[in-house]
Amino acid sequence: MAKVPPRRLVSRFTRMVIDRSISWDLVGIVVPIAAFGLAPKFYSNELLLTYMMVYIVMAQGINISYGFTGYLPFGYVGFFGAGAYAGSLAVLDLHVPAILGVLIGGVGGLLVGSLLLPLFRLRGAYFAIGSLAAANALADIISNPSLTSITNGPYGINLASAYSSGEIYVSAMVLVGLSLAVVFYLRHSQFGLSLRAIKEDEYSASMAGVNVVKQRSIAWLMAATMAGMAGSIFGWATTVFYPSAVFDTSISVISIVFALFGGTGSLWGPTFGAIVLYSAYTAVGISNPQYFQLIYGVIIIALILFAPKGIVGVAKTTRARIFTRGKQVV
Amino acid sequence: MSEAELVVDGVSKYFGGFCALDAVSFEIRRGEALGLVGPNGSGKTTLLNVICGLYPPTKGQIFFRGFRIDGHKPHLIARAGINRTFQLAKPFKSLTVRENIDLALSHRKGDGASLDEILNLTNLTGMVGLEAGNLNAGQQKRLDLARAISLEPSVLFIDELGAGLNPVELNELAEILRKMQYGGRAIVVVEHLMGFLEKVVDHVLVLNAGREIFRGELRNALNDQDVKRVFLGDSIGH
Amino acid sequence: MTQSAIEVSSAGVAYGNMKVLNDVSLTVEQGTAMLILGANGAGKTTLLKAIMGFLPLREGELSLLGHNVKQASTAKRVKLGISYMSELGLFPPLSVEDNLKLGCHGLHRRKVKERLDEAYAIFPDLVARRKEAAGSLSGGQRKMVGISKCLMSHPSVLLMDEPSAGLSPKYVAEVIAVLGELRKTGLTLLVAEQNVSFLAAADNACVIESGRISFRGTIAELEDNTTLHDAFFGLEGLNDHLDS
Amino acid sequence: MPNEGKLAYLLFEYSIIAGVLLGIFYAFLSMGLNLIFGVQKIINLAHGDMVMLGGFGAWELYYTYHVNPILAVVIVIPFTVALGLALYYLLIPRLSGATDMETLSLVLFFGVSQVIEALTTLGLGNNERNLPINSIPSHPIHVLGQAFAAEAWVAAGVSLPLLALFFFYLYGTPLGRQTRAVMADSNEAAAVGIDSGRVSAISFGIGLALATSSGVMAIFVLGGVNPSEGPGLTIIAFAIVVFGSLGNPFGTLLGGVLFGIAYEAAQVYATSWSDLVPLVLVLGVILLKPQGLLGKRTRVV
C-alpha cells in the first residue's frame, strides 16, 4: 500500500461520505441480503429463493463482464457448468464437504476462465460467439460418452448424499453478498475506474498508465469464478442434474436479460432485474417455459430498441428530466 | 549538452507490404520542442503510435533515457514518461473530468503536479465534476492533454491539437504548450497549422511518404524546395 | 438557366457537440470551377459531405441547381445531376467496369453500354483493366476510374475531395490536366484540395480555416491576397487571429 | 473382404465425397448469414432459427397442402423475403446510430431468435418434425462403388442451383452490383446515389430466404428439425462464414465444403466427437486467423 498523506486521506473520506451514490450502493448490498435472510419466514420454497440468488450472482457476473469491460459472453454458462461439475466431482470423488465443493466450483470457473483468456483478442460478435462455442465445446466434452468414467458422461450427477437445504441457502446468501461486494468495489475503486476507461478506449487508457490486459483479465476471472461458484451451488441445490441442464445456453441468456433489464454498470440494476424477472418466471415460466421465453425475447428486443441502459437508465433519465424541468438545458 | 531523452534510431514500420515509416531517426532533449510536419499519410501518426508502443517497429530501435523501449507495452511506456494526445481527443466520456485525471494520476510514479495544478494549467478548473462527454471540442482536447501530462511525461507528443479549433481556443493551447516547455519537458508537436507550430517549436522534422525529407528550422523548411513541392505542388514557390 | 450550381448560405455543421463548419457561405456559378483550399482538418471534406447530404446542416440553407435541397436525400441530389468523388473515389473490391456501371446505376442497359464506350474512349488505359478489381490499380489509374465513374451519369456538377491525395507529382499533373479538359465541357467543378497546383484548373477559390471561410474570390484576387499564403505557411496570419 | 489398407482408403474416399455433398448444403445454409453481415455488418443470431422455420414450413406444406419438399424450397422464399423486409423496417432504423451498434444488434437478434423459438414451440409444439424419406428421391446413389444416401445428393443437388442463382444475382444483376457496392463501402455507395437502406432491406430479406429454403433440406440432412436447434445451427453457419472470411461469398462456399469434409471425417474416425467439429473450427479460426481463409488483413489494432 502506498502511503497516503493524511490530508488527502481526509479529503478522500469526506468525498466518500458526501457521495450519495456510495451510500445508495451500500444499501444495495445490505437490503438484498437482509431480504433473503428474512424471506424463508414468509415464503416456504427455499429452492426457488436459492435459484433466484444464483441468478442474481449470474446477472452480476454479466454486469462485471459487459457493464465494466464491454465484453458480452454468450457462453457465460460455460463457467457455470464447469463450476457445477468441478464442485460435484470433488464432492463425489474426493469426498470433500459440499461447502468446500462450492469453492472448488469457483476454482473450476477460474480455470476455464483462464483457458479462455485468449478470447479477449476478439471483439464484439467474435467474442460473444467464440465464448458460446467454447461453452458448447466444454459441454460436449463433459457429456461425451467416452469420458463416462470421469464425468459420468451424459448420465449426469447425483449429489443427494450431500444435500443440506440450510447450508445451501446460507452459501447462496454469502455468494450474493460476495458478488455485490465485488460490484461495489468495481464501482468505487481505481480498479473499476480503469475498467470503465478501458471499455471506452483501450489505447487511451493505456496512455493513462492502465495495464489494459491485466485489469481486464482480472475482471473477467472474477466473473468466471463467481459463475463457477453459482453453478456449483445450483448443482448442489438441484441434487440430480444432467450436463444439458448446467450447460444450457438459456442460462447465459437469462443472466444477460436480467442484467440488461435492470441496467449494466449499476449495482442495483442486475439484482433488481433478477428478482423481478425471476419472480415472473416462477409465476409464468415454470409451467409454460415457452411463454417465458417469448416474454424475455420481447424484453430483449424492447430493451435494445427503447432502453439500452435498462430500468436503472430509464429511472436516471426520468429523474434528470424532473430535476431539470423549467431550467434551461445547457 | 545534455543527454537526449528520446532517441529514435532508424525506425521503419510496414503494414503488410506497405511502408508507413522508412528509417526515421531523431533525438530530442530536455526542454526542446520539435515540430513533426508532413502531408496526410506521411507517417506522423504511425511514428507516434510506434514510439508509444501501440505496435512495435518493423526495424530500428527506440531508446528513452538510455533504455530500449521499442516492443514494450504502451502502459509501461506511459508510466516511464512518454505520453501523447490524440488527433481526435479521446477522453473517457462517461467519466468526470476529475475521474479522467485521477485515473492517470494514480499510475504516476513519484511526485508531480497535483490535480488542481493540472486543472489550472489546462484551464479546466470549473469543469471538474462534469462528465467528459458533455465538454465541447476544445475542452475535450484540453482534457486529453491533462490526462497526458498527469503522468509527468518528460517527452510529450501532441497530435494535431489545433485541428477544428477556433483561433481563441488555439491561442489558449499555444499558451499551455509554452508553459509546459518551460517546465523542462521535451515536446513533439504534430501540426498542420504552421502559424500554431511557429508559436511552439523551433525545429521541425518533415516527413513525406514515411521518409524524412527535411530537418531544421521551421523558417528554413518553408523555403526548402522539397518541402514546398510536397505541400504545394510544383506551381508555387517562385 | 441562370441559377447558380451550388449556393451555400450561412451553413453550420457539427459532429455531436464539435462544431466543424461555421457560417459558411459560398456560391458556385454554373460552368465555373471553384477550388476550396485549406489545411487538413479545416473542414473541406465536411463542406463537401454537407453539400452531398451525408451530414445535415444545423444552420443555414443549401440549394443545388436552383433546388432547395436542405432536407433532400443524397440519392435525390445525385439525381439532380450532382456527382461526388470522395477521397477513396471507388469501390476497391469491385471490378473497374462494375465501378463505372455503378456511376450511372438505374440507367437503361443500352445507355450504360454507350457511356462505358465513352469512358473507355477518354481513358483507353482502362479497357485492358476492366475486369480487374479497382483497388488493385495504381494510384493514378484509380483516380481515372474514380473520375470516369463520376462522369458516367453525365452530371452537371462534379464535387471532388482531394483528388491529389496519395498521388505522385506526375499523376497530380495528369489529374489537373483532366480537370482542365472537363472545364471546357461546361461542367461545374468544386474541388477541395491542399495542393495549390490545382489553382491552375480553377476560376475561383475559397480558403477554409478552422471551419470558417477566410477568403473568397477569383484566382487573380487570391494571388494578390496574403490569406492563401497564411493558410499554409501562416506565420503572421495566425498571429493576427490570435491577438485579435 | 478388403484388407485394412483398402478399407482405410475407402473410408477416406467416403468422407471426402460425403463431405463435399454435405459441404455444399452447409455453404447454402450459411450464405444468408454472410450476405446480411456483408451488407449491414450485423451478425444475424436468428439465422439458425430461420433455417428451423424453413423446416417447419416444409413440414406444414407437405402435410397440409401435399407440397413436395423440393418445391417447398422455392415456395418459402417469397414469404421469407416479405418477413425479412417487415423485420428490417421494424428493427433496423431504430438501431442504426447507436454507439455500440455491433453488440446491441447481436443482443437484439438474440432476442428475435428467442421469440421465433418460443412462437414456434407455442404454435407448433416442441416435437421434432420429420418428413418421410420417400417424399424426395430416395434411392442411394453409388459412386466409386460406395453408396451415398440419397438425401445428401438431393440436398446438394437443390443447394447448388440455388447457390448459382444467388451468385448470378450478386454478380450479374444491377441490384446485385449495388449490393456489392454497399458491401464494399456504404459511404461510397451513398455517394453514387444508391439508396443503401433499400438495398440493405432487400439483402436482409434474401439472406433470410436463403436460410429458410436451406431449412427445407435440413429436415433430411439433419434427420428432422425441432424448435430449439436454431442457436446450434447459427454457430455452425458462423463457423463456416468466418472460416471462409466474413463478407466474402466465395469464402463461404469454400468454408462450407471444408466444414463438410471435416465433419464427415470426424464421423468416420471419431464418431462421438464429431459434434465438436464446428465448435473447434470456429474457435480455431477466430483465434488463429480471424480474417478467414480468403480474407486480407484490413484492420490494424
Image (spheres, coloured by chain):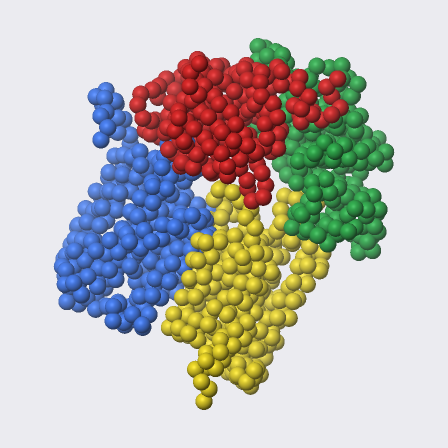
In-front residue for pair D243/B116: D243
Left or right? Give the position of A219 relative to D72.
Answer: left
Left or right? Give the position of D255 relative to C82.
Answer: left
Residue A128 seen in render: yes
Please give the name of the residue rendered at 79% of the width and 26% of the height, measured from the top-left corner.
Answer: C200
Residue A242, percent from left and from top? 28, 68
Please give the name of the residue rendered at 55% of the width and 24% of the height, measured from the top-left corner.
Answer: B36
In-front residue for pair D30/B222: B222
Please give the count of numbered marks on the rendered protein.
0
In the displayed structure, would residue A164 be above or below residue D123?
above
Residue A118, percent from left and from top? 39, 50
In-front residue for pair C184/A292: C184
The N terminus of chain A is located in which quarter? top left
Quarter of the rendering containing residue A250: bottom left
In the displayed structure, would residue C92 be above or below residue D25?
above
Residue D229, percent from left and from top? 44, 67
In the displayed structure, would residue D284 be above or below residue B92?
below
Please give the name of the residue rendered at 22% of the width and 25% of the height, measured from the top-left corner.
Answer: A3
Quarter of the rendering containing residue D88: bottom right
Left or right? Give the position of C162 relative to B10.
Answer: right
Left or right? Give the position of B71 relative to C12.
Answer: left
Query: Which chain has been coloured red in this picture?
Result: B
Please give the name of the residue rendered at 33% of the width and 58% of the height, measured from the top-left corner.
Answer: A78
Q: Colour of chain D?
A: yellow
In-front residue for pair C168/D87: C168
Residue A34, percent from left and from top? 19, 46
Q: Colour of chain A?
A: blue
Query: Which chain has been coloured green in this picture?
Result: C
